[in-house]
Image (cartoon, rainbow, N blue to C red):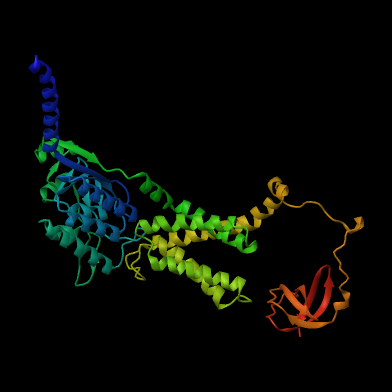
Amino acid sequence: MLMRAVLPFFLVVLTLFSHRVNSQNKTQVFVLEIRSEIDPRMSRYVDLALAQATDLKADLVLIDMDTYGGTLDDADKIRTQILKFPKPIHVFINNNAASAGALISIATDSIYMAPGGNIGAATVVFGDGQPAPDKYQAYMRSKMRATAEEQGRNPDIAAGMVGQPIGKDSFTVGNVISYTTSEAIENNYCEAKVNSLEEILEEQLLIKNYQITRFELGQTEKIINYFLNPYLQSILLLILLGGLYFELQTPGVGFPLLAAAIAATLYFLPNYLNGLAEYWEMLIFIAGIILIMLEILVIPGFGVAGISGIVLFSAGIILVMLNNNAFDFTFVPGQSIINAFLILLVGLTGAIVIVFVGGARFVESKAFKKVSLQETMDAKQGWTSNFNQSNLLNKQGKSWSVLRPSGKIIIDETIYDACTRGEYIEKDKEIQVIEITGTWVKVREV
């Protein structure tokens, strides 16, 4: 009876133990996808994926690739990450591995290609598709050669994917190497033609008992990528600029400044986390804002501080969007620079439209009328704003504060609100009253 009672318990324990041993014996396969442009977002994606593969103690990593390439700097970062990774990394070229994709593929331990796939055509080009100068090609050739040598592949073929030398320092892109699947196999740049990741594992690597884990970006990372969209960045800049303008026009309200601060955070933080924004670039932006505010609130007129502030403000915004190394823009595509200027221009244009068009419409809206005074105190009804200050006409005194153009003056130890005809008057300057208008005293500097 005792054995009958205990036997089911032992069977359950044995089953659980067997399942655990079987799970531990499975080869842990980690899969990540490179199926879009190689840019800072992809570089961060690969970095996060390989970090997770390390945490999960994956036995090998498979890259599912289909890309036409991208920026050289980010491709080099991914290449370096792959070469330093302690576990085997294999790539499945499920159609294209062009340009930067070819460099990344050569860095892996083995290359497998789908029927109709291709690899190569790694010539460095600018945004308009025109080949970059020879120094770019020479740099790319050296990267391709070094990567191929590291993985035991023919370095001449790798260099030929960039272009053929026609002299000591010149290259031609007319004979660029680009292999089909069968050509890559023939030249030892592909281990085999396969149709799926499972075929690589089961028929090429001879792994029958495996468990696949596919990498997916977390919700936070998806949000970061979402805010890196150029169109959304233009909107954030619009809110940032508009918010600063309205806060300067109506200091103390708070809401415009809060909107500007949120927009600035959503603009800079994703770029910083994505490796684009550096501390010094954000400091340039902040310095620009400080100079602009000093020019408007403290320094009369509009001169060096204001112009410097605008330059630093714009430079900070543009530098954040570029994948530059300090002030070295050697490997920043010309199209990226143009796009950065366009995003800034769209933001500025949108802010101007909102300020002048949207502001006027808002004043006439029902929402504004609900929170603003709409009654008119007409003089015909007995209302007046004239406090009979005509005795001040032609009197002299001093500016009690800076007048730009409005401020305060002091005459006979009494402080009055005053304004100029448009010019700025520094504090403690001799002034003379030239006109009385309602409650305002109009003055000029003596």
Q: Give the x, y percent position of residue 21.
A: 11, 34
Q: Which quadrant of the structure image shows residue 416? A: bottom right
Residue nearest the viewer, comparing 209 with 408: 408
Q: Residue furthest front?
A: 2
* Residue 440 shown left or right of residue 50 in the figure: right
Rendered-image quadrant of the C terminus = bottom right
Picture quarter with the N terminus: top left
Q: Residue at x 12, y 31 (%)?
A: 17
| In the displayed structure image, the side of residue 266 where residue 407 appears, left or right | right
Residue 324 in picture, x, y percent from top left? 35, 65
- Tell which of 231 and 87 is nearer to you: 87
Q: Nearer the viewer, residue 301 or 173?
A: 301
x 61%, y 60%: residue: 246
Q: Residue 130, position in %: x, y? A: 34, 61
Relative to 165, 423 lies left or right: right
Whether 351 is drawn above or below 409: the answer is: above
* 319 sits to left or right of 389: left
Can you tell which quarter of the image residue 255 is in?
bottom right
Determine the residue positioned at 55% across, 76% down.
305
* Residue name at image x 37 percent, y 64 percent: 278
